Amino acid sequence: MNKKIEKWDTIGIINSYNLKIFNATMYRRKHPKMQKEGNFVVLDSPSWVNIIPITHDNHVILVEQYRHGSDSVTLEVPGGLVEPGEEPRIAAERECLEETGYKGEGAAFQIGRTLPNPAFMNNECYSFVWKGCEKVSEQQLDGNEDINVIRVPLNEIPEMILSGKINHSLVMNAFFYQFLKLNQQVGQSEK
């Protein structure tokens, strides 16, 4: 039997804290059926982008960097925050150029949009592919970035995910969209 799930009513805001890349807000909300009230934390963040840069010879440009949350070095695609008033596609292209020095032919195209963790976050992550990428400049890194650029054949990506070399969930999600939307079978390079 299907039942209708309803939105909870927001009674008010208990408090909010600015945490640089997030605002943490505690909402008081009311269950629509039980009429019970409770406090719930929501991380308010700008939207995020990631982009899969693909070269003419079917290599993907990856970035290797240290991540504070996991206290580890990760292998990812370029990505970052969407600035206020910025279109996600422009943000993705900007992040790619800044982090790698690579630029594609024409405009990147969107392959997906996901909710990173709707249990307690209110932002979206947009995924893009940029074809015909080639190196056009040096990296333009922020003061807290240290990024190693790595070229990998596109057909090696599935094995890198399965082996755990690529383990960032939003990056894996971008590749999931990439293989599905571009009608590729996992493990095969683009024709």
Image (cartoon, helix red, strand yellow):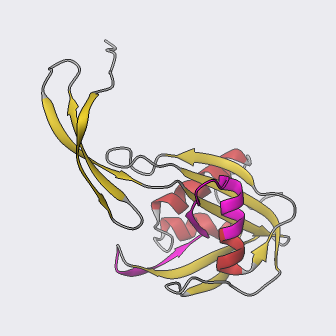
What number of labels is visible?
0
> Based on the displayed image, in which of its 4 quarters is residue 118 positioned?
top left
Q: Which residues are magenta?
A: 70-94
Vertical comparison of 98 with 122: above or below: below
Q: Is residue 120 left or right of residue 186?
A: left
- The quarter of the rendered structure image containing the C terminus is bottom right
Q: Quadrant of the N terminus?
A: top left
Locate residue 132, reporting x and y percent.
84, 67
Q: Is residue 4 magenta?
A: no
The verdict on residue 75 being magenta is yes
Image position, residue 141 (x, y; %): 61, 83
Question: In the image, what residue occupies the spot 46% across and 67% down?
Answer: 167
Residue at 62% across / 47% down in the picture? 112
**Left or right, residue 178 beside residue 59:** left
Question: Which residue sits at x=58%, y=46%?
Answer: 113
Q: Nearer the viewer, residue 53 or 181?
A: 53
Q: Nearer the viewer, residue 15 or 69?
A: 15
115 lies above or below 60: above
- Residue 59 falls left or right of residue 36: right
Residue 111, percent across and down?
67, 48
Q: Tell which of 186 and 5 is nearer to you.
A: 5
**Residue that protrudes farthest toward the top in the picture:** 1
Q: Nearer the viewer, residue 31 or 51?
A: 31
Name the image quarter holding residue 133: bottom right
**Residue sitting at 51 percent across and 70 percent down?**
166
Q: Is residue 178 above or below residue 27?
A: below
Q: Position of residue 119 (x, y in %)?
A: 32, 44
